Image: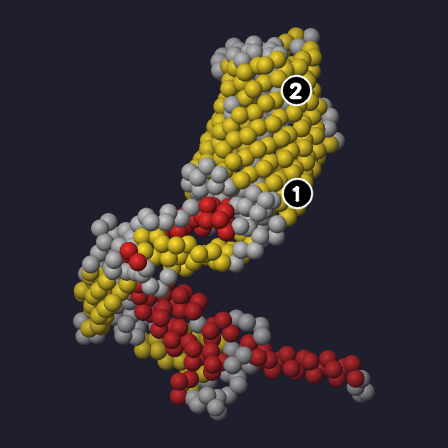
Amino acid sequence: MKLTSKFLFRLSVGILLSIQSAMALTVQINGDLPEDVLDSLNGASLLVEQANNEDAASQDPYASATADYARLLAVLYEAGYFGAEISIKLDGREAANVSAINAPKTANSAVINIQPGPVFRYGTAQVKPIAPGTELPKGFATGETAGLSTLRGASERAISGWRDLGYAKARIVDQKVTADHRNAILNAALQVNAGQQLKFGNLTVKGNRRVRTERILEIAGLPQGEVFSPEALDKSAKRLRRTGAFGSVAFSEAENVGLNQTLDITLDVSEQRRRRVGFGGDIATSDGLSLSAFWMHRNLLGGAERLRIEGEISGIGGDTGGDNYRLSARFERPATFGPDRDLYALAELEELNEVNYFTRQATVGVGVNWIASDRREYEYGVGLMAAETRDAFGEDEYLLFIIPAETRRDYRNNQLDATKGYYLRANAAPFAAIRGSDDGVRAFGDYRIYRSFGTERPVTLAFRAQLGSVFGPSLADAPSDFVFYSGGGGTVRGQPYESLGVDVGGGLIAGGRSFLGLSAEARFKVTETIGIVGFYDYGFIGSDPLPSEGSGDSQSGAGIGVRYQTPIGPIRFDVAVPVDGPNESNNFEIYIGIGQAF
């Protein structure tokens, strides 16, 4: 039989693969231990990792075994086994007894035998002195299972307790940790030296190139001369980060205490690129295609001022009346009226070609954005709005002086895919009519709440309530873009966009002075990346300032959707049909976007 070179090559590759398969490392861990501890041991072992690695043949099993003694012992200490014995044999030889110089490069089997011994419990468990209000870990107490995590946690909390009160140099000066192997008892006594209560000293800034030092100091708002506080340092870092001007922010404390019990602080920053651009899009069968883009400067005048110019075209190819255009510019200056109050100025041009009305408007305004905390923001200002409109009542022009105010509370665990928490946005805009319309107030609220159940395949229930009102002007005199409509992706899915308003006769529809919207979703997680959603939406539009029976009409819609998880949030695909209302004979609507519907 004639053997070709191709056949010989295939044969040699097959032999090599067979040899590599035969040399694959197998690892076995034996020990009378709880399941969770065995899982932790498997996760910590380099030998197990090597056995699961396709490229295991190129690794040194003896080096992995030598490291495993310490790694596995650390896991056992965490679980309270302070008298454990570990044996690691590679091909029957104890790894610890093999010389590193003459160690074989391969091994077929690894057997890890663990004699855990008894679980140790705390005898003495104390830290002295403790700062007022400090709570040590619950597991750090006499009779509880002893573990390095609770011991470490007790030390960390003892120090942080004193630091929270201004004792920045608090440290552990003595620790006596002894193991009584006969009685399986671990005695731990830690001694703290709190030192002196200190005050913030000088703040030195390093690393800035374009942002002026004096502005960085103003934005950081570190309270020089006041009692030291880690919380104050954390707040300062967040203020600097939220400007967007800095890529990294790091505070470091001086080693030595200064005059009058002060502690100097050094701030190291690195700056972001000054300019940024971005693009976005959304599509729905009724609403059509929306395209947006923005340009932003993060340090316009050298003080971390931000200028954002944004443009948007929406309604492309939709059934919403025509294309809509918006061009806006917003300038923000951080730390203008205090470290947490930013000045803003805005200008906006907008043209809306909607099914039931047309408006072309220009808005300018100034105001203050107050970031009260990570979860709470308040915004208030003054502005002017000029508009030309055409609706069911004819053509109109008006000029309004507006005093808008808004509060936002965001306690969601994830803005794009919340599974718990709540979100609230409420605003009110009193307006005085300089020309056209009448004086009044427009108010709107949006409340969302989330609850989840289960662990393997969790289910999230999400609820949303929206309420809007216009007080003052009559229905005919109310500004066209201040009134409310229902239908579409933001209100009632399955119903045509802004299909529900107030019927004023002659086949004409005007916006209502009141709006009530309710939505409910059940979100089922099928896999790590795939989810299914069922939803129901309800909307009411009334002619009175508050929703009331007999003053308007309602509609509803329902549907199902699919969510595909991505690093930037879930991709949303919803199909909805009308359930009730004037347009219930309509077919179906499709909505595609990024992030949950609410």
Residue 429 visible within the image: yes
Quarter of the image for the N terminus: give it.
bottom right
State the image quarter where residue 332 is shown.
Answer: top right
Camera-nearest residue between 289 and 144? 289
Name the residue: 63% across, 15% down: 398
State the image quarter where residue 360 is shown.
Answer: top right
Q: State the SS at label 2.
A: strand
In the drawing, does residue 534 fall left or right of residue 93? right
Name the residue: 46% across, 49% down: 217
Name the residue: 68% across, 35% down: 312
What x and y, as percent, mark residue 592? Answer: 64, 38
Q: Amino acid at mark 1?
A: Trp
Camera-nearest residue between 155 and 123? 155
Q: Residues within 10 Å of mark 1 (few under 14, many from 20)?
A: some
Residue 553 visible within the image: no
What x and y, as percent, mark residue 182? Answer: 18, 75
Q: Is residue 53 above or below residue 465?
A: below
Q: Which mark, by number, is residue 387? A: 2
Q: Which mark, by number, is residue 413? A: none
Q: Which mark, by number, is residue 295? A: 1
Q: Amino acid at mark 2?
A: Ala
- Residue closest to the far front: 259
The Cα–Cα distance between marks 2 and 1, rounded to whole angstroms, is 26 Å
Q: Could you tell me if the residues under marks 2 and 1 are in contact, i.e. CB atoms within 8 Å?
A: no
State how many labels appear.
2
Name the residue: 43% across, 77% down: 67
Q: How are the colours assigned in the image?
A: secondary structure
Camera-nearest residue between 421 and 375? 375
In the drawing, does residue 19 fall left or right of residue 429? right
Q: If you read the primary sequence from the N terminus, does the residue marked by circle 2 or circle 1 appear first?
A: 1
Camera-nearest residue between 305 and 523? 305
What x and y, as percent, mark residue 546? Answer: 49, 15
